[in-house]
Amino acid sequence: MIVAEVKPMAEIQDTIKKYSKVLISGCGSCVTVCLSGGAQQVEVLASSLRTAAKSQGQQLEVGQETQLRQCDPMFIEQIRDKAAGYEAILSMGCGAGVQTMAETLGNIPVYPALDTVFFGGADGQGGFMETCAACGQCILSRTGGICPVARCAKSLTDGPCGGAQAGNCEVSKDTRCAWQLIYVRLVRLGQVHLLKETTPPKARRVHPARLNRAE
């Protein structure tokens, strides 16, 4: 899941300060799950912007809508006519959603209302944690299903750095050492022998990456 958080209000206001008619567009997928960009968050941001504009004596019309997925042009096409009635769009989707919307609509500026921060999952305590770096060359089959690229502060792929103390990372005492977690998991699975294998250098990735399923 892509995890994002709402930008500071001052930054959002500065981004749209030259417009008097703005559409806030939410996304019903990842950012809804992490409570950053769904219909409820669109309502909160719209209300906040209206209130701020009124208190400053400014004229600002704010529209609202939420799509199922902003990263799919098919869903963006569904709001083309509505979007044409506004001067700018504030996207409460991830970075991919912002770019897809901007490219699909073309003649209307699209600005991000969120900061995309990581790929991750729920931590079971009401929060979310980075668990995947989308490196494209997954080694989870050798690390007990725990990604050292994303979960080790130094992204070490062949074992710990030696600086961990009591199983906690030396970079952040509130974070468990990823390789300690990997070791414990491999012991539980009876696969400790996998620690003897070395990870070959990752091939250089060419950006932007593409995946074609049309054929």
Image (cartoon, helix red, strand yellow):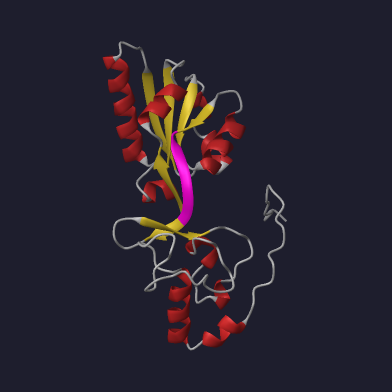
Residue 213 rendering spot, x and y as whole percentages: 67, 56
Placement of 36 over or under 199, stated as above or below: above
Q: Would you say the magenta stretch is mainly helix, strand or loop?
A: strand
Residue 196 rendering spot, x and y as whole percentages: 60, 83
Residue 29 rendering spot, x and y as whole percentages: 44, 48
| In-front residue for pair 212/20 | 20
Residue 118: within the magenta?
yes
| In-front residue for pair 141/107 | 141
Residue at the spot 42% in from the left edge and 28% down from the top edge:
11
Residue at the spot 56% in from the left edge and 23% down from the top edge:
108
Q: Is residue 28 visible?
A: no
Residue at the spot 33% in from the left edge and 55% down from the top edge:
127
| In-front residue for pair 163/129 | 163
Q: Using residue 87 as the reference point, say whether residue 208 is left or right of it.
A: right
Numbered label tally: 0
Residue 11: within the magenta?
no
| In-front residue for pair 142/208 | 142
Residue 40 falls in image quadrant: top left
Placement of 138 over or under 204, stated as above or below: below
Q: Using residue 141 as the reference point, say whether residue 174 is left or right of it.
A: left
Residue at the spot 40% in from the left edge and 33% down from the top edge:
65
Q: Start and end of the magenta stretch? A: 113-119
In which quadrant is the C terminus drawn? Answer: bottom right
Residue 131 rendering spot, x and y as whole percentages: 47, 61
Q: Can residue 13 be seen in this view?
A: yes
Placement of 128 over or under 180, stated as above or below: above
